[in-house]
Image (tube, rainbow, N blue to C red):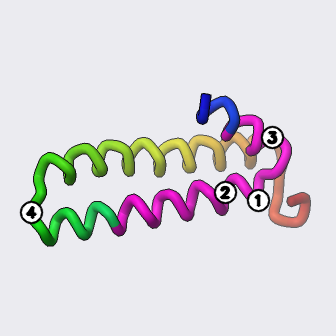
C-alpha cells in the first residue's frame, strides 16, 4: 500500500516525494550507523536491506521522472 501511495505522490507532487524519500534514506542511514557502532549485526542486516530498497526506489522513481520529461523548473 505504501508503494502505491508513494508512486501516486511521485505523479502528483514529485518534489515532495523526492524530499520524503531522501529524508527516509537519511534516517535509515543514521540507524544503520548507530547499529554498526553498537555491533548489533541482526539489526544492521535488516536496516541495511531496507536502506538499499529505499535508495534504489528513489533512483528508479527519479529516472522515471526524468524519462517523462520532468525537469527542476517543471516541479
Viewer-side label of 3, 4: 4
What residue is disc 2 on? 18
Q: What is the total number of numbered labels drawn onto the structure image?
A: 4
- Foreground of the two, 40 or 9: 40
Name the N-terminal-most of marks 2 and 3: 3
- Crowding around mark 4 (Cα neighbors within 10 Å: few <14, some 14 to 19, many 20+) is few
Q: Based on the picture, tell me whether residue 24 belongs to the magenta stretch.
A: yes
- In the image, is residue 75 above or below residue 5? below
Cα–Cα gap, marks 3 and 4: 40 Å
Residue at the (60%, 33%) spot, across then down: 3
Q: Position of residue 66 (x, y in %)?
A: 74, 48
Mark 1 and mark 4 residues within 8 Å of each other at the beta carbon:
no
The disc label shown at residue 42, or none: none
Mark 4 lies on a secondary structure that is loop
What is the span of residues highlighted in magenta in the rendered image? Answer: 6-30
Q: Main secondary structure of the magenta part?
A: helix
What residue is disc 4 on? 39
The disc label shown at residue 11, or none: 3
Mark 2 lies on a secondary structure that is helix
Name the N-terminal-most of marks 3 and 4: 3
Amino acid at each position: 500500500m505504501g508503494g502505491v501511495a508513494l508512486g501516486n505522490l511521485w505523479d502528483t507532487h514529485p518534489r515532495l516525494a523526492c524530499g520524503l524519500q531522501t529524508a527516509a534514506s537519511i534516517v535509515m542511514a543514521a540507524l544503520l550507523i548507530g547499529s554498526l557502532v553498537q555491533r548489533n549485526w541482526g539489526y544492521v542486516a535488516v536496516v541495511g536491506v531496507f536502506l538499499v530498497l529505499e535508495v534504489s526506489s528513489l533512483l528508479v522513481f527519479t529516472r522515471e521522472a526524468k524519462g517523462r520529461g520532468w525537469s527542476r523548473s517543471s516541479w
